[in-house]
């Protein structure tokens, strides 16, 4: 199965046409000099302050994002790069979505109810939703949208999460039924993905019509795209902006220079190591949010030396998690406890925080037959900002416990190439996700991204039971048990959860920290407005 | 007795012009070059030794958060001391470049002299395979080899050495061709001196001029190649301190905390300019026996 953006961090392409560093730097210098001269002429610069009061309408927001390339598209269901995601979130809307607090909220659905056996999910649709071309959104559109996504001949990126979906039956204009081939008590979670946008029955990606707050105007893959306000949007008053422009950038330095030279109004995902220095600029505000994103070290539990759970525990005990967060994330992250999905209601927060314990790690290694320590190769690649850095810090920490880590850095294409999911000891990256969907993605024998080759009979049974349990408390208890198994024996070293940090000009208002891990309030620009200062 | 026979005049006539090295040093350009090169080489050699005295940190020790203004030049992308990494990062670059250049010289000179001296089919065979190697862009060839064989030190040295060899072989061949038509070579051949002895004793000393120039030129290319490959993540592997790697690691903070990039860039630039100045003067000294004499 192909790497899908729903399940993992994207692989940013490097387009040839996006603004290059040199060009942006040139503009930056020119503007900087201009600003300096202007300041000399008019005396003290105007005092900048964040806009307040009721939202103002109008204006164009220019958003800079790294990644994206010639392969970018506006297709509602096959987004790959960050810029793709930013566009589809504003063009299309799914039935449910994860809001900034990582809570599942209805969007185009009014109500979602499971049957007692969790095999049939009934969705009542909002009645006031119009597509960009003025036609109302109905059950028929929902059914054809899902048919398009799970099309066996051309499955879209959202299809992976819908493997259990048998069919979508249209009950009437405003009600559909999702019929599943096996019970899933958290199917509503699977529906709350941005890759499951509802499109008209006669959808054509060349004419991208959706229900989102912005309508398509122009699109140049790898460069920029422009959207205009959807006057028929179903939420009163929103969006506030007249226009939204999304610009692609090749790399982080070009992106940051573009912001500092006011070439863009907001940029998504700045390197955490630069957060403090960018924040020092009085014109710039930082949007920082705790997320459940994680960048684990992955140990293959079916290959020596990691087939011995004592070795896995020793490796986990060798990590100084606080130092990891300090050095790799500049302190902008939360501690990891070798378990993912920290926002899941079932997360067992009573389990003690694992800390560095070199003596115990050495003891465990000796018990496992490595009294003199051992040498392992750690495969790393710049798959996400901080990945190569994390590998280096780990190598240094592990040395204390007698673990010699040989770092092998490959490029991203090689990392996700043929050997991906086969490395004995490597890294990976995931955005925030709740437990059961994440398990489906990475820790079942059937999961598409089971890097650790985790196949634990007791764990598998617990997950199967949890999937069929409609009662929340009961299901959360099962989830906690499954997590505890991974806490004790799992193949992941989860040392921390990185914050998501974006930067924007002070005159931009309406951005709120989002736990989803997606940049700039989860790209929900419908709430954004511009203060008069610009 | 005539004036011509006066012993004084004879000694003046037979007095050899100053040696190549002396002619080199006599040029001002060369003095600057030697100064620049020596400064960087000394820094690279002594840096690792003086590290504990100067900064008190090792090059892989964490001293603070990333990109902070701690210490003399701040911290790098992982919160390590930039100055420590800089001091520790030059030696490997220099050693690898020198070894690669040496390997390239040995291979190239061997191939070039053999081709020129043997002539005929051997010459065509060596020089045409040379052309094939030359047709491959050297950096692409290096990338390919390292991707296949892994980023080991010996691979780096071997690959860069091999990409240099054809160019050196060309220069050697043309220089050798000029020499082997000389009478003293014929004389040696008449006395049935073994071929290898003729090449080593008679030909090699007469082509050192162009070879020294080539050595300097190839050294600058080697430095560039090793640094580039490290920058691309295929040379020195982290957490090793290395100038090329440092540039890549710290370039995201170029506008904000530039020393992590500026220091290694400066060092590499000064080193290559220095070597180039020496090479230039060397070329002049080799071509003209009176260079520097007038100054």
Image: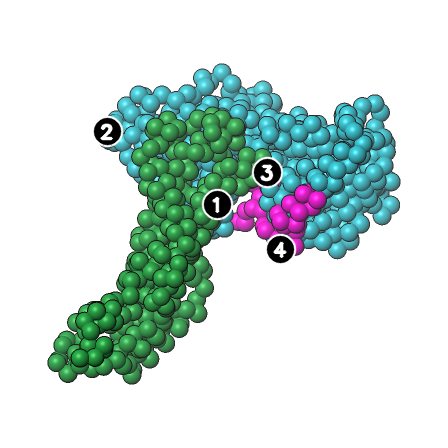
Chain A image colour: cyan
> Rounded to the nearest whole Å, what is the CA distance between mark 1 and mark 3?
15 Å
Please tell me whether mark 1 or mark 2 is closer to you in this view: 1
The numbered dot on residue B255 is: 3
Q: Secondary structure at mark 2?
A: loop
**Chain given the colour green:** B
Give me the residue at 35% from left, 66% from top: B290
Q: Earlier in the sequence, mark 2 or mark 4?
A: 4
Q: Is residue A19 magenta?
A: yes
**Marks 3 and 4 share the same chain:** no
Q: Quadrant of residue A297?
A: top left
Which residue has dot 1 on it?
B265
For label 3, the crowd category at 10 Å Cα-Cα, with few meaning under 14, some 14 to 19 and many 20 or more, is: few
Residue stretch rendered in magenta on the structure: A1-30
**Marks 4 and 1 share the same chain:** no
Query: In terms of depth relative to the viewer, which is nearer, B163 or A100?
Result: B163
> Rounded to the nearest whole Å, what is the CA distance between mark 1 and mark 2?
44 Å
Which residue has dot 4 on it?
A16
Which residue has dot 2 on it?
A371
Query: In terms of depth relative to the viewer, which is nearer, A143 or B218?
Result: B218
Give me the residue at 29% from left, 25% from top: A362
Please tell me whether mark 3 or mark 4 is closer to you in this view: 3
């Amino acid at each position: 199965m192909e790497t899908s953006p729903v399940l993992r961090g994207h692989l940013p392409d490097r387009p040839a046409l996006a603004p290059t560093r040199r060009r942006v730097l040139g503009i930056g210098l020119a503007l900087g000099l201009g600003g300096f001269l202007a300041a000399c002429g008019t005396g003290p610069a105007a005092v900048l302050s964040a806009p307040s009061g009721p939202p103002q309408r109008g204006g164009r927001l220019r958003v800079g994002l790294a990644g994206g390339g010639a392969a970018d598209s506006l297709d509602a269901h096959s987004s790959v790069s960050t810029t793709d995601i930013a566009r589809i979130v504003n063009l299309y809307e799914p039935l449910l979505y994860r809001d900034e607090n990582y809570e599942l909220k209805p969007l185009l659905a009014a109500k979602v109810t499971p049957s007692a056996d969790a095999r049939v999910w009934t969705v009542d649709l909002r009645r006031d939703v119009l597509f960009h071309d003025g036609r109302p959104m109905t059950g028929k559109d929902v059914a054809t949208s899902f048919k398009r996504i799970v099309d066996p001949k051309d499955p879209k990126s959202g299809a992976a999460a819908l493997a259990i979906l048998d069919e979508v039956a249209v009950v009437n204009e405003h009600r559909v039924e999702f019929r599943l081939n096996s019970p899933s008590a958290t199917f509503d979670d699977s529906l709350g993905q941005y890759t499951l946008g509802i499109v008209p029955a006669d959808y054509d990606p060349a004419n991208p019509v959706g229900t989102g707050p912005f309508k398509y105007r122009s699109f140049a893959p790898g460069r920029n795209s422009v959207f205009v306000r959807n006057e028929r949007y179903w939420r009163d008053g929103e969006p506030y902006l007249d226009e939204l422009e999304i610009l692609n950038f090749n790399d982080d330095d070009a992106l940051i220079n573009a912001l500092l030279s006011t070439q863009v109004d907001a940029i998504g995902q700045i390197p955490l190591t630069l957060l403090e220095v960018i924040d020092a600029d009085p014109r710039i505000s930082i949007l920082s949010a705790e997320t459940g994103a994680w960048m684990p070290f992955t140990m293959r539990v079916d290959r020596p030396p990691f087939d011995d759970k004592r070795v896995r525990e020793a490796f986990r005990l060798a990590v100084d998690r606080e130092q990891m967060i300090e050095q790799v994330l500049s302190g902008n992250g939360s501690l990891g406890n070798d378990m993912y999905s920290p926002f899941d209601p079932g997360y067992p927060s009573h389990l003690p925080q694992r800390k560095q314990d070199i003596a115990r790690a050495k003891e465990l290694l000796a018990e496992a037959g490595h009294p003199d320590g051992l040498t392992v190769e750690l495969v790393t690649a710049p798959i996400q900002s901080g990945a190569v850095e994390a590998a280096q810090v780990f190598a240094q920490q592990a040395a204390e416990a007698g673990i010699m880590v040989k770092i092998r850095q490959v490029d991203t294409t090689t990392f996700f190439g043929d050997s991906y999911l086969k490395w004995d000891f490597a890294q990976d990256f995931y955005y925030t996700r709740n437990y059961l969907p994440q398990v489906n993605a990475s820790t079942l024998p059937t999961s598409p991204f089971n890097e650790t080759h985790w196949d634990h009979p007791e764990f598998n049974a617990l997950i199967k039971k949890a999937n069929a349990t409609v009662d929340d408390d009961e299901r959360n208890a099962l989830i906690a048990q499954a997590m505890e198994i991974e806490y004790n024996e799992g193949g992941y070293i989860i040392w921390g959860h990185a914050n998501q940090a974006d930067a924007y000009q002070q005159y931009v208002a309406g951005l709120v920290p989002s736990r989803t891990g997606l940049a700039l309030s989860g790209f929900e620009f419908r709430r954004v407005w511009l203060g008069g200062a610009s | 007795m005539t004036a011509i026979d006066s012993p004084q005049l004879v000694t003046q006539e037979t007095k050899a012009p100053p040696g190549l090295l002396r002619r080199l040093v006599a040029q001002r350009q060369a003095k600057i070059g030697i100064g620049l090169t020596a400064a960087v080489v000394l820094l690279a050699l002594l840096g690792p030794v003086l590290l504990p005295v100067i900064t008190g940190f090792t090059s892989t020790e964490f001293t603070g958060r990333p990109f902070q203004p701690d210490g003399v030049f701040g911290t790098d992308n992982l919160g390590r001391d930039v100055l420590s990494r800089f001091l520790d990062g030059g030696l490997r670059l220099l050693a690898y470049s020198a070894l690669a250049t040496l390997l390239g010289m040995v291979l190239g000179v061997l191939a070039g002299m053999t081709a020129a001296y043997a002539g005929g089919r051997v010459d065509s065979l060596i020089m045409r395979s040379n052309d094939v190697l030359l047709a491959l862009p050297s950096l692409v060839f290096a990338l390919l080899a390292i991707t296949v064989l892994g980023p080991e030190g010996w691979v780096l040295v071997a690959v860069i050495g091999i990409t240099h060899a054809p160019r050196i072989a060309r220069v050697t061949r043309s220089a050798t061709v000029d020499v082997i038509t000389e009478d003293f070579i014929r004389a040696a051949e008449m006395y049935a001196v073994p071929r290898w002895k003729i090449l080593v004793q008679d030909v090699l000393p007469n082509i050192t001029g162009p070879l020294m120039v080539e050595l300097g030129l190839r050294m600058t290319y080697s430095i560039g190649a090793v640094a580039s490959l490290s920058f691309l993540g295929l040379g020195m592997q982290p957490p090793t301190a290395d100038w090329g790697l440092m540039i890549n690691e710290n370039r995201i903070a170029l506008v904000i905390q530039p020393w992590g990039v500026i220091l290694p860039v400066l060092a590499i630039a000064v080193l290559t300019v220095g070597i180039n100045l020496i090479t230039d003067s060397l070329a002049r000294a080799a071509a003209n026996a009176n260079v520097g004499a007038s100054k």
